Amino acid sequence: MAKYVCDACGYVYDPAVGDPDNGIAPGTAFADLPEDWTCPECGAGKDLFSPQ
């Protein structure tokens, strides 16, 4: 699965890791994240992420 980087702050969403602090289990693809999920570092929306 592809990693995605936040264009605003550089945070990398890695599907293998997920976002456990925000209830996102490891193995969750970026496309499967909830629409209201935001960058845990800066709060940017999914639309500000690009494939790495």
Image (cartoon, grey):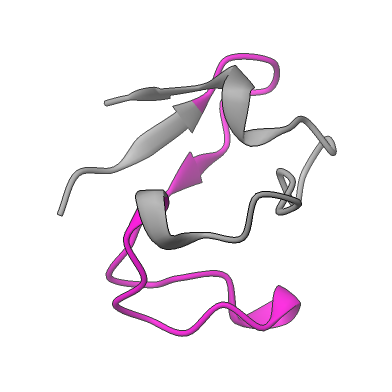
Q: In which quarter of the image is residue 45?
A: top right
User: What residue is shown at x 60% (from left), y 82% (from top)?
Assistant: 20
Residue 47 point in image, percent of width and height: 60, 23
Task: Give the farthest residue toward the top.
Answer: 7
Look at the image and tell me in which quarter the C terminus lies.
top left
Up-down relation of residue 43 to residue 22 (above or below): above
Q: Give the range drawn in magenta.
A: 6-30
User: What residue is shown at x 71% (from left), y 54% (from top)?
Assistant: 37
User: Is residue 7 magenta-colored?
Assistant: yes
Residue 3 point in image, percent of width and height: 29, 43
**Most common SS among magenta residues:** loop
User: What residue is shown at x 58% (from left), y 15% (from top)?
Assistant: 7
Front-lying residue, 49 or 31: 31
Up-down relation of residue 37 to residue 12 (above or below): below
User: Is residue 14 magenta-colored?
Assistant: yes
Up-down relation of residue 35 to residue 43 (above or below): below
Look at the image and tell me in which quarter the N terminus lies.
bottom left
Task: Give the farthest residue toward the left.
Answer: 1
Query: Would you say 3 lies left or right of 19 here?
Result: left
Q: How many marks?
A: 0
Residue 2 point in image, percent of width and height: 19, 44
Task: Give the farthest residue toward the front.
Answer: 35
Front-lying residue, 46 or 10: 46
Up-down relation of residue 33 to residue 16 (above or below): above
Query: Would you say 8 lies left or right of 43 here?
Result: left
Query: Would you say 39 lies left or right of 10 here?
Result: right
User: What residue is shown at x 61% (from left), y 34% (from top)?
Assistant: 46
Q: Quadrant of residue 26?
A: bottom left
